Image (tube, grey):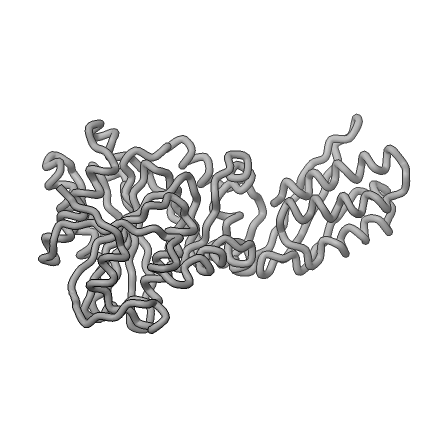
């Protein structure tokens, strides 16, 4: 049985904190297992940041256990338009987050477990962490065929990926986090991690596609809670500490001073989209208008998530040159974002000549432009 208590009690007794404002001081060392009481992706990513920034990990190791309601999490150097279906995320109200570590894009829901292993940089060893997870799985269900690959993935039955991995190495501290698929919605996973956007050119880190499988498919008696407890027990055994999970509320400023500012930053457009490496869009689309099919070519450069250069090659006489020029001028400098572009084109429509056919053409063009985002 794994025991749980409040983090505040534990921190007051045992945590070494790097800064005085964190509120607790101690000289003890050892290992700590904590679990989030929140299922919010931004709050849980903020906890990772807080531990990395504020805890002295020189003589301490921390295992952080967490789960999220549906979310897509991209790596620090990735392009969300390249990695996922943003339109579908908006339709399904699935959150998009950018983490601080590198690596590829993953889908989270309550059927997926997240594990973060914190150590000093000197003691960082992701292979050992993954082997620990495999030992925990084998202890729980000896018949499971699971092993760690050279790419730091965990495979089930030598083929199906059940865990992906990423890491952040700081000056003195480091963390390695990984996923573990227990009973995630694979239909949603496969649909949201498929980009519909064409003509993107980017130097951003691309994800490597893989076949995935839930542990639940192999053994329906397994639950996320069982897996969490088994991993915590194996971690406690390896680090010779009590089999004890400490619960943490990621919104509690009395325990984690400054945590809410970290959470807010991770939700900002500037972080999620604005940190995307520079990319270009060069694409064509067809517009069906009355009895005609018209070809439109669009070229854009996007930097920090904003349109830096824009060119729209329209059929001759489709729009008055002045109006077409005004559209390009307005798009330049705007966020590469459907909400902002919708507001922009609605404003421009008000100054558009009161010509019903012209306004129909304008609306059709703008609808197609927004579909690029």
Q: Is 23 placed left or right of 289 in the picture?
A: left
Residue found 18% across the figure and 48% down from its top: 232
Q: Residue at x 37, y 32 (%)?
A: 185
- Which image quarter: residue 56? bottom left
Q: Is residue 168 visible?
A: yes
Please tell me in which quadrant of the rendered image residue 353 appears: top right
Position of residue 171 relative to residue 182, above or below, is below
The answer to whether residue 188 is left or right of residue 16 is: right
Q: Nearer the viewer, residue 110 or 182?
A: 110
| Residue 204 image position (x, y, % from top left) | 48, 57
Q: Is residue 151 visible?
A: no
Residue displayed at 18% across by 41% down? 146
User: On the rendered structure, is 100 left or right of 331?
Assistant: left
User: Image quarter for residue 47?
Assistant: bottom left
Nearer to me, 27 or 107: 27
For this view, does 57 lie left or right of residue 110?
left
Q: Is residue 137 above or below residue 277?
A: above
The residue closer to the viewer here, 32 or 341, is: 32
Which quadrant would the N terminus be assigned to in this image?
top left
Figure label count: 0
Q: Residue at x 71, y 57 (%)?
A: 332
Percent across and percent down for residue 24 are 28, 67
Residue 111 % position (x, y): 32, 36
- Which residue is situated farthest in the right direction here? 354
Q: Which quadrant of the figure contains the C terminus? A: top right
Residue 355 locus on image (x, y percent): 90, 36
């Amino acid at each position: 049985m794994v025991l749980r208590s409040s983090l505040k009690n534990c921190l007051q007794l045992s945590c070494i904190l790097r800064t005085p404002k964190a509120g607790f001081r101690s000289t003890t060392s050892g290992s700590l297992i904590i679990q989030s009481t929140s299922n919010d992706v931004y709050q849980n990513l903020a906890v990772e940041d807080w531990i990395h920034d504020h805890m002295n990990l020189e003589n301490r190791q921390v295992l952080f256990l967490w789960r999220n309601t549906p979310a897509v999490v991209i790596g620090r150097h990735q392009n969300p338009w390249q990695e996922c279906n943003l339109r579908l995320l908006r339709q399904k109200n699935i959150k998009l987050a950018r983490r601080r570590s590198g690596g590829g894009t993953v889908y989270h829901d309550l059927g997926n477990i997240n594990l973060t292993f914190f150590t000093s940089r000197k003691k960082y060893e992701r292979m050992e962490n993954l082997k620990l997870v495999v030992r925990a799985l084998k202890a729980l269900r000896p018949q499971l065929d699971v092993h760690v690959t050279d790419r730091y993935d965990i495979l089930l039955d030598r083929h199906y990926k059940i865990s992906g991995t990423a890491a952040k190495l700081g000056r003195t501290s480091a963390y390695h986090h990984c996923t573990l698929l227990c009973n995630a919605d694979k239909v949603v996973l496969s649909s949201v991690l498929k980009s519909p956007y064409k003509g993107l050119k980017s130097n951003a880190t691309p994800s490597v596609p893989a076949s995935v499988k839930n542990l639940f498919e192999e053994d329906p008696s397994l639950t996320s809670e069982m897996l969490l407890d088994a991993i915590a027990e194996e971690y406690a055994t390896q680090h010779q500490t009590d089999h004890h999970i400490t619960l943490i509320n990621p919104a509690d400023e009395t325990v984690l001073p400054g945590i809410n500012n970290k959470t807010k930053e991770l939700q900002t457009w500037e972080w999620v989209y604005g940190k995307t490496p520079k990319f270009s869009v060069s694409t064509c689309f067809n517009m069906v208008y009355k009895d005609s099919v018209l070809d439109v070519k669009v070229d854009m450069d996007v930097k920090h998530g904003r349109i830096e250069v824009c060119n729209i090659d329209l059929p001759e006489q489709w729009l008055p040159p002045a109006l077409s020029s005004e559209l390009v001028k307005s798009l330049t400098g705007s966020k590469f974002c459907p909400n902002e572009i919708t507001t922009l084109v609605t404003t421009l429509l008000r100054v558009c000549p009161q010509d019903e056919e012209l306004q129909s053409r304008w609306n059709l063009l703008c609808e197609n432009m927004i579909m690029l985002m």
